[in-house]
Amino acid sequence: MRYVRTTQSLDSGIALVRWVGVAALLLTLTACQDEDPVMAEGRPVSVVTVEAGQLAETIELSGEIQAEQTVGLAFRIGGRVAERLVNVGDRVEAGQVVARLSPTLEQNALAAAEAALAAARGEVDTTRSAFARQERLMDQGFTTRPIFDQALQAQEAAQAQLENAEAQVEMAQDRLGFTELNAGVAGIVTARSVEPGEVVQPGQVVVQIARDESHDAVFNVPANLLETQVGDTPIRVALADDPAVVAFGRVREVAPQADPVTRTFEVKIGLESPPEAMRLGATVVGTLELTSRSIIQIPASALTQQGISPAVWVVDPQSSAVSLRSVDVLRFDPGEVVVSQGLEPGEIIVTGGIQALHIGQIVRPLPPAAATGANAAFADPPGRRPSPS
C-alpha cells in the first residue's frame, strides 16, 4: 500500500512540471505575438539634416565719454597757494590763470636783484672811466703797463658782474611769474587737488584739464570679447539718454592688464567728430556689428545630455543606428540651439522620440509630415525614463 501511494505522488509531480513548461512556452509565444512589428523594423523618430547658417552677432556695452588727453597743471616753484580761480567743470582757455601763489618772497627777491643790477651798472661806469683815463695816459707815456692792465681787468670784472646781475634779475622776474599758474591748453577742469592756504611743492598737480581736441568712449570689456576680431570696423556710440545723438569711432587703445576687481579690460574708442552733446562723463552705449560667421542651429528638442554635457542623437545613414555625441552650445534661443562644435553639415540628428533611445538602437526616420503629427507619440509611458548607455 505504501509503494502505491509513492508512485502516484511522483506521477503528479511530473505532470505539474509538464504543465509549467507548457505555460512558459505559451507566454513566450504570446510575447512574440504582442511585439510591435513597427518597432522590430526600427523605432520611428523625427529627424533633421544639419545645415550651416550665418550668424551676424551684435555686441552692446555701456561706457562713458572721457578726454583722450588729460593735462595736469602744477607750479614750477613751491609756495603757499593764495587763490585757486577755477573749479571742477569750468571751461578754461589757453593762457588763462587758474591759481596763484603768494608772491611776497619772489617780489623781495626781484627787488634785491634789481638793486644789485643798479650797483653793477655803477661799478661798470666807474671802471670804464678809469680804464679810459689809463688808456690816454698810456698813449702819452705817463703810466705804466701794470697800472694799465689793472684798470682793464677791473673794467672786465665789472662788466661780468653787470651781466650776472642782469641774469639774476631775469631769474627773479621768472620766479615772480611762476607764482601764477596758467592753463597751457583749452579744455575742461576735471579735478582739483589743492585749496587756498596750502603749501605746495614744485611739480605738485593743482588741477587737471581735459583737452578739447578729441574725446574717447571708454568701455570695460570682458576678456572673452577681446578675442573678437574687430579690425578697422567702425563702432557706433550713442548717448544712453538720447540714442539719436550718435558718433562713430575705432579702437584706439586696449589696456594690457585686467582690472583686479572687475576682471575686465579698459578699451578706448577714439571718436570721430563727436557732437557737442557728448560731454565728458556722459554715459554712452557702444554697438559693434560683427562680421557674419558660419554656425549650426538645431531644434531645441534635439538636445539631451551625456553626463553633465549637452549632447544629441546622431543617426548613421548606413546602418540607421544612433549614437550619442557631445556638443558645445554657443547660445540658447527660443526653440533653437546654436552649436559651435560637435556637428557637421549634412549629418542627421534625432529631434523627436529621443527619450527612449539607447546607443546602437536602430531607428526609422519619419517623413517630415508624419514626424510633425507623430511627435506626441514619442513620449515614454509614465514612470519610464531610460538613460543613455
Image: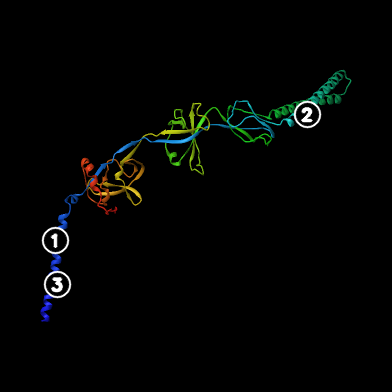
Is disc 1 placed on a helix, strand or loop?
Answer: helix
- Vertical relation: 58 (above or below) 135: below
**Residue on which the image places disc 1:** 26
- Residue highlighted by disc 2: 112
Q: CA distance from mark 3 to mark 2?
A: 141 Å
Q: Give the SS element for disc 3.
A: helix
**Of callouts 1 and 3, which one flags the residue occurring earlier in the amino acid sequence?**
3
For label 3, the residue is 13
Query: Secondary structure under badge 2?
Result: helix
Percent of width and height locating residue 172: 73, 29
> Alpha-carbon neighbours of circle 2 within 10 Å: few (<14), some, or many (≥20)?
some
Crowding at mark 3 (Cα within 10 Å: few <14, some 14-19, many 20+): few
Q: Horizontal placement of 292 versus 11: left or right?
A: right
Measured as percent of width and height from the top left, residue 60 is found at: 43, 35
User: Label 1 near label 2: C-beta < 8 Å?
Assistant: no
**The disc labelled 3 sits on which kind of residue?**
Gly
- Amino acid bearing label 1: Leu
Quarter of the picture holding the N terminus: bottom left
For marks 2 and 1 on the same chain, the one whose residue lies earlier in the sequence: 1
Looking at the picture, does residue 263 appear above or below residue 164?
Answer: below
